[in-house]
Amino acid sequence: MKRKDFLKTAGIAAAGAIAAPYILPSGRLFAQSGGNHMAKHVIYVMFAGGVRHQEVIDQSYLTEQGASGAHNLMQNMFNFVGGTPNNTVIYGPSTPNAPINNVIGQGTSFGSIESQGVTFAETNAASRGHYGGFNSLIQGNQAASQGLANKPINPTIFEYLRKHAGFSATDVWFIGNTIANSVPLLNHSEYPGFGAEYGANFFAPSTTFGNSGQQYLSDAKFHPEEQLDYMRYMRTFLDNQFDNYGAALKQIGNTKDESEKIKEFMREMFTKGINNVINTNVPETQPGGQLAGQGGGDISALAYSIEVMKKFEPKFLTLNFSSVDVCHGNYTSYLKNLHTCDYLIGELWKWIQSTPPFKDETIMILSPECGRNLNPNPIKDQNNFLSYDHSDNNALRVFTQIVGGANISGIAQSKLNAQKGNRIGTPTNPVANIKDNVLTIGEIFGVRNLIEADGRVTTSNSLFDYM
Amino acid sequence: MKKLFIYLAVSIFIFSLGCKKKETKDPNLYQVNTVDLYHSSADKTKRKTLDIYISVMYSNLFQLGMSPAEVAKASDALYSIGDKQLGMEVLVSNFLNDVSPQVQIPTNTEMRGDIDKFIEDAYIRFLIRRPTEAEKTYFRNFITANPNLEAQMVYMAFATCNEYQFY
């Protein structure tokens, strides 16, 4: 072959290799450029343990408890109506006369989530319960027969994205605030054709990096790579022998490099220490801050989500908060925790919009898994405020917020820009269901049609259809 | 005299029956139940819970029991990680680093001194069955071909393999 012909052939081959599509787990071809993703990252927040519509969207504050004046407890997520409460019952403990820092609300250079994005102010929850709600948020399905303490009965958004969009295991994360309430079960279903091999990586940081993890995971012996390779060879042999009998176990499918990166992450987190991680990522927990010394599931879920984002730059990350569920027996703590969770969202969006590669390239979606009752139960707290459960139709009234950075594209960009700052839906005209979030995320990553074709979502709408 | 002799003989016979030594069990004697080995891995159809897995693994590594409270705590740690196999690797590595108590693993010299025995012992300790000839051959060849391989990595492979998660 002449040199000229060789160069020409080699050039064509190289170009072909770069541009060539590859086959996804679902069997279809997909361009290596990442297809038609409207955003590079989606952060999905399950907020925050049963949120009563009246205190959030209506901003009724204490009016239903006999006090006067509507106030906005959640200045980072929603625009001011009655201003922040002057009653100090929700503030503290370190500086009880001031609200927690307004990170992105009105008056800051960011602006609230409501002003930057779109708020579906009257959305239907698919379930009055937490676990049913969680499952609807990730399955896009009513999941009426979903059993407690069971894996999701339908494929989850994690599995759809890994199977159809070709995301790797460390592209998809779920950070739980607890190991209670079956939260760790949510990272994948056992639905035929899906399952663990398409599941999300999961940590519950308050346990993984808390006392239990500190005792049993933090002192792992260092093994040279050569020794680990030996171990993997032998284990593969053992697994293959066992597979012959048809009892193969599916794993999350982290590659060798991904596994070692996760172990490295764990070592780094244990070295940093849980207090240091929280103080770094949740500034108000530092000495002198209004959450000084506080930790807990929601705060650690946020702090470690940020650490996961720094380390793995995931395409899709879900995190959940649930501290407002204290409302079953303590309304004052419920208000305080709503105020705190709003602050955590402020810190999260501020971090996203300040930190490459997330800055301007991310869409964040927030929905409660369920609401709370219209009428209280008889339990009174230290301030004689009545508490609320979640079992009536008011518990099906929730909201959804969606906000995107400047560089998102496609209809996500055009529709979010067109509806920026708007509220969609009224009490007499509810719009959207939390199930719709799954197709919305699918649409952002270009796999909506494939998710619908799998036939396991019970909605045909994404949020963009309503804008 | 003859009557007296008969009475005496009968009395001795009856007395001897009544003085039979009573067999008593030592109330402080404990022992491990005998466990039958599986004929093959196909006999294992039920998956261990995390608690059972950790408890058995601890016993296999340390030859000691683990308290229920400690099992629960270790189980929580493992439950909080999505990739269970990765979590098991970290947990086993953590145990391998324990100083007191220490894991009971043959030394590398012992392993290479009698490879067949090492393999057979590992299968019985972890998988409660004897290796097949094919399995024995594979491990014999693998250990021989890799002089740097450490015995603890063989144990880690057994402690994190799929079959070990079933009973």
Image: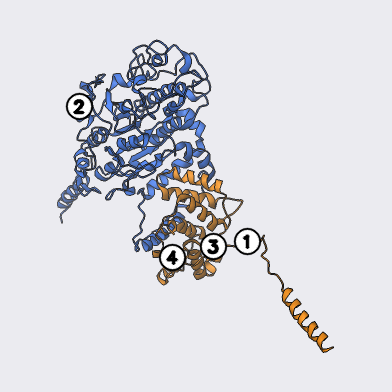
Which quadrant, please, contains the N terminus of chain A?
bottom left
Q: Label 2 marks which chain's residue?
A: A
Rounded to the nearest angstrom, the CA distance separating label 4 from label 1 is 40 Å
Is label 4 in a helix, a strand or a loop?
Answer: helix
Q: Residue A157 sits in which quadrant?
A: top left
Same chain for the residues at labels 3 and 2, yes or no? no
Q: Residue at x 51, y 58 (%)?
A: B152
* Residue to which mark 3 is pinned: B108
* Residue to which mark 1 is pinned: B30
- View extreme (right): residue: B1
Rounded to the nearest angstrom, the CA distance separating label 4 from label 2 is 62 Å
Q: Earlier in the sequence, mark 3 or mark 4?
A: 3
Q: Look at label 2 and name its amino acid.
A: Tyr
**Front residue of this view, candidates B89 and A98:** A98
Is label 1 in a helix, a strand or a loop?
Answer: loop
Residue A123, given in percent of the width and then of the height, sits at: 27, 26
Is residue A20 visible from the viewing direction of this image?
no
Same chain for the residues at labels 3 and 1, yes or no? yes
Look at the image and give the colour of chain B.
Answer: orange
Q: Earlier in the sequence, mark 4 or mark 1?
A: 1
Is residue A372 visible from the viewing direction of this image?
yes
Q: Residue A315 sits in which quadrant?
A: top left
Residue A120, given in percent of the width and then of the height, sits at: 26, 24
* Residue to which mark 2 is pinned: A466
Q: Residue at x 48, y 64 (%)?
A: B128
Q: Residue at x 78, y 84 (%)?
A: B9
**Chain given the colour blue:** A
